[in-house]
Amino acid sequence: MGRVRLVPRLTAAALALCCLCLLAAGCSGEARTRMTPPGSFARDVDLSGQTYVVGSKEFDEQLLLCRMTIALLQSAGAAVVDRCNTQGSDTVRSALTTGAIDMYWEYTGTAWRIYLRQEGRLTDPDELFTAVRDADAANGVTWLRQTPFDNTYAVGVSAATADRLGVRTISDLARLVRSGSPDATMCIDQEFTGREDGLVGLLRTYGFQFPDGALTTIGLGDIYPAVAAARPCAFGEVFATDGRLNALRINTLTDDMGYFLPYHAALTVRSDVLARNPRLALLSERLAPMLTAQVMRELNARVSVGKRPPDEVARTFLHEQGLIG
């Protein structure tokens, strides 16, 4: 959120004059409290007097989605409590279901496997979204419109390494591991090791195990340069819409056995919060269709590669689209 400037106490006369000016302008004080200029979203949604707590996970894409949501809510007159950059998927989800936050963007594959604990393999994005939406309603969570982009997990390898080793699919990687090649090394982050849709299921589906010392657990952001340099790992856990893939010339291996589910993002909102103002759903209706894979990878790159603040990137994009002023 923008900074609130402190102003000296007004005299009674000055305050009266201020109110008269505001009434004459037809804004009734709204311009003084609205922290983001209104655009096309605010023309159809009035959230004046509402307060929302918005959360997110800690990586770049989540920060961008969180900042976009905050800016849109503010443009419609709402006050917003910023809970972006919360560590860990389980932590953010728990914050939603316990009422600590009102909304955050989640991924369909994550909800299906981790929160709803479903084993069925639904590979059609729309079918998966419908199943997640319907099942999560019992938890008091409403899923709004999903994005076109699919930020599925993937296994990354530099283009040079892929060419040298002749590895194009995850089955190729499995064969490389079984051959005992010293290049069969992989970097992962801590969360991926314990997720139901993470490492264990991947190894089980493709029928292989990394030998001792071949797996290195590092921070998610450190995986990309490690894979690009092939040190300490030739392969790594990556996200399909991460902006560093293009910049670092990292390929993603084809998931030829269809292990990874679709991971389309959608704004999840506590159902009681949405019931208080159903027009809040227009936020997702307007924003989600704009977030294609190409758009999201470019926005992510502005943060991860261009080192621009997520809030700046988010607001610039919304302004370019006319959603905020």
Image: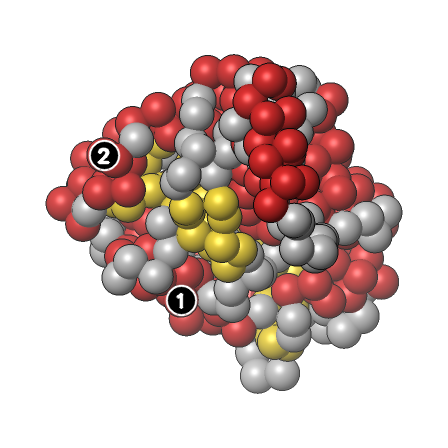
Quarter of the image with the C terminus in it: top right
Q: Is residue 219 visible?
A: yes
Q: Which residue lies under the disc numbered 1? A: 91
Residue 194 percent across, percent down from the top left: 41, 71
Quadrant in which residue 315 is drawn: top right
Q: Is residue 306 above or below residue 147?
A: below
Q: Which label sits in the foreground, 2 or 1?
A: 2
Q: Is residue 82 above or below residue 222?
A: above
Labels 2 and 1 touching (C-beta < 8 A): no
- On the rendered structure, is 112 left or right of 260? left
* Residue at 41% across, 60% down: 92
Residue 175 percent across, percent down from the top left: 57, 57
Q: Secondary structure at mark 1?
A: helix
Of all residues, the one furthest to the bottom in this rendering is: 212
Q: Which residue lies under the disc numbered 2? A: 275
The crowd level at tag 1 (other Cα within 10 Å; few <14, some 14-19, many 20+) is few
Q: Secondary structure at mark 2?
A: helix
The crowd level at tag 2 (other Cα within 10 Å; few <14, some 14-19, many 20+) is few
Mark pair 2, 1: CA separation: 24 Å
Of all residues, the one furthest to the left in this rendering is: 138
* Residue at 51% across, 68% down: 87
Q: How many marks?
A: 2
| Amino acid on which the number 1 mark rests in the picture | Thr
Residue 214 is labelled as none
* Residue at 28% across, 42% down: 273
Closer to us: 48 or 246: 48
Residue 105 percent across, percent down from the top left: 45, 44
The mark that comes first in sequence, 2 or 1, is 1
Quadrant in which residue 14 is drawn: top right
* Residue at 30% across, 31% down: 277
